[in-house]
Image (cartoon, rainbow, N blue to C red):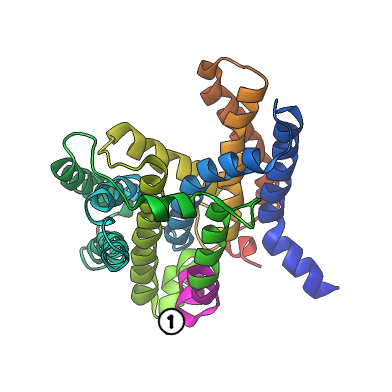
Amino acid sequence: MVEWRYWFAENRNTLLAVLMFVVMFAIYAGNHPAGFTANVVQTAANKATLLAFVAMAQALVIITSGIDLSVGMVLTLANCVASWIVVGTGLETTLGILGVLATGALCGAVNGLIVIFGRLQPIVTTIATGAMFYGIALFLRPFPGGSVNETLADFMTGKAFGFFPMSFVALGAVVLAIWVPYSRSVIGRAAYAAGSSESAAYMSGMPVKLAKFTAYVLSGLLAAIGGLYLTFFSYTGEAAYASGNTYTLFSIAAVVLGGVSLMGGRGSAIGAIFGALAFRTIGDLLFVFDFDPLWQPLFQGVVLLFAVSISAFGLFRVRNKLDWFP
């Protein structure tokens, strides 16, 4: 009984994000002109997957009590790089994908090295590096263009077994390949410890610097996967400054909606994913109810504020920071 209560306390906000997504998507699908069909689910999944990858990237850094305001620009840079090199034969395409992933990991490594060894604030560091990454993207694609392996793009954005979105399959594969091993490893536990109290984690002999560096590297890698998927969807590359900033801001909203504490040390990438799915569904709801698109930011803000208020009720019982980490 005690173990169940502890598990529920640890995952309460994640469960709330799941419930919000299920309720909102049920309302959306139930009122969609086409009904609850495989095509409706596929379209919604493809739109939400991009934000889900970026939200995962943001969550890993926020868990360490940091923040990465460059994730949107890493996504944009990866999109531009992919439009150059994810083309040609199967081998060339594979090497191109590896190149895109390496680009994202390198961007994350730059952020981590500056934050850890340069001892600069993450918010300042990632604003600066984000501008650098966007500059490189603009150099690669001063105008929208390029291409991608269309066979692979169609497969990765299509349906598995004729009904299940391949984008969700890819998202699940990334969770199993990256988040699950990371969260259960010594480095992952050190990341949580650093987020709750970095000095205590350091005094306990935990690899704090390695944990924070790994979080930034994986953040860049996940954002690059999002950029790769953006190329699959659009078949082109574009250094879109507004889009990069939007994904950065939405990733923070999705993380909060998914129950990841901005104080660090609490939450999970799973919660961030469902926060992203719920946040994207808000726009879909406006579509099916024929709201003016100008109302979307207001509606998103109200839902986000409501969700954060519910998840913050536990703070009223907190006397000191140690009470927040059971």
Q: Quadrant of residue 319?
A: bottom right
- The residue singled out by tag 1 in the image is 206
In the image, taking residue 221 as reference, residue 146 lies left or right, namely: left
Residue 235, given in percent of the width and then of the height, sits at 34, 43
Q: Is residue 67 in view?
A: no
Q: Which residues are magenta?
A: 178-193
In the image, taking residue 19 as reference, residue 322 lies left or right, namely: left
Give the residue displayed 72% in from the left and 62% down from the top: 9
SS class, disc 1 = loop
Secondary structure, magenta segment, majority class: helix
Q: Quadrant of residue 144?
A: top left
Look at the image and tell me in which quarter the N terminus lies: bottom right
Q: Quadrant of residue 248?
A: top left
Give the residue displayed 67% in from the left and 47% down from the top: 311
Look at the image and tell me in which quarter the C terminus lies: bottom right
Q: Which amino acid is tagged 1?
A: Met
Q: Is residue 64 above or below residue 46?
A: below
Q: Is residue 6 in view?
A: yes
In the image, taking residue 155 as reference, residue 17 lies left or right, namely: right
Give the residue displayed 48% in from the left and 82% down from the top: 186
Instruction: Give the camera-side residue of 194 and 164.
Output: 164
Q: Is residue 173 above or below residue 319?
A: below
Q: Is residue 189 magenta?
A: yes
Give the residue furthest to the left. Answer: 139
Residue 260, given in percent of the width and then of the height, sits at 56, 54
Give the residue displayed 27% in from the left and 38% down from the top: 238
